Image (cartoon, coloured by chain):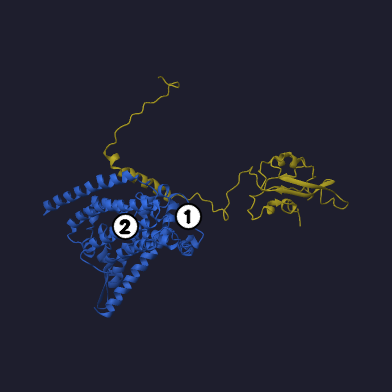
Amino acid sequence: MELADIAIKFGLIIVIFLISLVIAMYSTYAERKIAAFFQDRVGPNRAGPFGILQPMADGAKMFLKEEIIPANATGFLFIVGPSLAIMTACIGSAVIPWGQSVTIGDRVIPLQVTDINVGILYIFGVVSLGVYGVMIGGWASNNKYSLLGAIRAASQNISYEISMGLSIIALLMVTGTLSLGEIAQQQHGWHWNVLYQPLGFLLFIVCAFAETNRTPFDLPECETELVGGYHTEYSSMKLGFYLFAEYINMFISSAVMATLYWGGYNYPGMDFMGNLLGPVWGPLFGTFVLFMKIFAFIFFFMWVRWTIPRFRYDQLMDLGWKVLIPLAIANIVLTGIVITLLK
Amino acid sequence: MESLSNKRKQLEVKPLNFWERAYLPAIVKGLSITLKHFFKKPVTIKYPEEKREFSENFRGMHSLKRDEEGRERCTACGLCALSCPAEAITMTAGERQKGEENLYREEKYAAVYEINMLRCIFCGLCEEACPKEAIYLDGDIIPSDYLRKDFIYGKDKLVEAPLNQ
């Protein structure tokens, strides 16, 4: 590998990292603003024009708060918890194809950090690692509410990972590959997977809500029952990391959904636009389209938050085990039959 | 047992049909309702910059009125203090000297007139009690402050501005 290639890869990683941090930061602002609009309010509007400096103010506040480690907490694990949460949230973006390859001169730059041939498996690995951050943090706090929140989070994530995996299997039967880059390529020209796998997409999005601990599946941190859930004992930027990780997770899962089901960076009239804009701006416009899709999903996450109330815990388990898993299996069988008949 | 009002209605609980049990149409309906609110105009009034319009009979800060020649109407009879259920008003009377006829309408006037705005309940009884039409609660909301003593308003804040200056 040439030095220039390494530099380009490194630059790409930094850019993606920064973009996901900025998006997570402004997701907090968007969440508050969108929540306000859904409730006929105005939302934050004091820090800067329309309140756009609000995330900075929140961040400064988080950093300046007192750092508290409870006397009976396990010191090391208490710090590992939020670090793990934010780390697993950030590394998920490595396999997402952000766009077609950009050609500058004779150098082809892929807009994907790494196109490993088991991209989906990697995503699943990262997602299941994410629960460790919550679990360790809740356990190390030495607080019953935290522990209950952590247990809830763990059991919820494990139950919904199963149906998520099963819904993906049906998708893999259609695409025939685990590489996210190839899946995105295959959807070129209206072959969006959501048209072939509507039920699979529905299952996947429900599970994505559960995996990111968003309403209606925000039981690990439901204030009314568990004080603050697994992050009850956390203060300062360690709390900030947990909250931040949730927003990064939301961004990454939106990106995964857009890539797997909604065509990724593909859009109607892509070939025409590609010729028009040239080899650099064409693919970058695709990236822009992908981000629009991601923002639409993030908006949907927030929209659902202000529409659907939280599940009761037994209802959550009922939905996960008795509804989603059978549906996912039925989806696999159906997909199998259709594929066999069409061949 | 027969009901007294004869308005009893027999409710029947129908089993949910497939779409109701699937829960998804209900979610879509809910989403559409919240989306409608998304595009509604916010009801918020951004207070310090915008002010809600007061009703015509809103009772705000008191003002001590002047007559058409610009003289203070108050004669320090003390009826407002007597009528005040919160005992917020206090005053000291003074006698008008020669040459002050253009300042005070009556021979007796209020040398000190104080209202404790923390005690005042804005009932408007002082307004009703006043025989000289000297006090009206036609002002704005009482502004906030840091110290209790700053809420005792004297004549400097209460008396209406002179007519022509």
| Protein chain holding label 1 | A
Q: Is residue A254 visible?
A: no
User: Which chain is in blue here?
Assistant: A
Hey, which residue is sitting farthest front in the picture? A72
Tally of numbered discs? 2
Hey, which residue is sitting farthest right in the picture? B98
**Residue drawn at (26%, 61%) of the image:** A125
Instruction: Tell me: residue B61, above or below residue B16.
Output: below
User: Few, some or many C-alpha atoms within 10 Å of disc 1 (few <14, some 14-19, many ≥20)?
Assistant: many
Instruction: Look at the numbered disc 1 and give the secondary structure of its residue.
Output: loop
The amino acid on which the numbered mark 1 sits, given as a three-letter code, is: Gly
The mark found on residue A43 in the picture is 1
Instruction: Tell me: residue B153, above or below residue A109.
Output: above
User: Few, some or many C-alpha atoms within 10 Å of disc 2 (few <14, some 14-19, many ≥20)?
Assistant: many
Mark 2 highlights which residue?
A131
Residue A235 coordinates in the image, percent (x, y): 44, 59
Residue A139 coordinates in the image, percent (x, y): 36, 56
Where residue B147 sits, quadrant-wise, is: bottom right
User: Which quadrant of the figure contains the C terminus of chain A?
Assistant: bottom left
User: Which quadrant of the figure contains the N terminus of chain A?
Assistant: bottom left
